[in-house]
Image (spheres, helix red, strand yellow):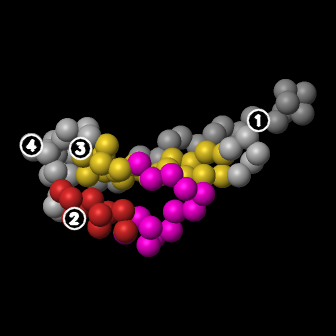
Amino acid sequence: YREERLQVRKRGGRKRALGTRRPMLVPERPNERWSLDFVSDAFTDGRRFRVLAIVDDFSRECLALVADTSLSGLRVIRELTAITARRGRP
């Protein structure tokens, strides 16, 4: 690079969020807020699977773990409906 008088391209910096961020409110009681997360992995034979985790943010209780090779939107709605029937809505 020096012999040819070339410059090494610099990587772009990290993008910053615009505006100011509000701190996330901490829940004050159980069943006030739930979090959903999808985790994906593969079996040794290469088939993919996904896990849906639903957690109560206050108590950190795992409300549901749903594992399947395919999790459709209808399946997620069905699981959320079953949890709200047992615990009520957050």
Marked residue nearer the N-terminal end (3 or 1) = 1
Q: Nearer the viewer, residue 28 or 14?
A: 28
Give the number of the mark in front: 3 or 1.
3
72 to 37, vertically: above or below: below
Q: Residue furthest top?
A: 2
The amino acid beneath tag 3 is Asp
Q: Quadrant of residue 41?
A: top right
Marked residue nearer the N-terminal end (4 or 1) = 1
Q: Position of residue 55 (x, y in %)?
A: 30, 46
Q: Position of residue 83 (x, y in %)?
A: 27, 59
Give the number of the mark in front: 2 or 3.
2
Characterize the local packing of mark 3: few (<14), some (14-19) or many (20 or more) Cα atoms within 10 angstroms. some
Q: Any mark on residue 50, and which? A: none
Question: What residue did someone put label 3 on?
Answer: 57
Q: Any mark on residue 85, and which? A: 2
- On the picture, is 46 further left or further right than 17? right
Tell me if label 2 and label 3 are in contact, CB under 8 Å.
no
Question: What residue did someone put label 4 on?
Answer: 28
Q: Which residues are magenta?
A: 65-77
Label 3 residue SS: loop
Tell me if label 4 and label 1 are in contact, CB under 8 Å.
no
Question: What residue did someone put label 1 on?
Answer: 7
Q: How many marks?
A: 4
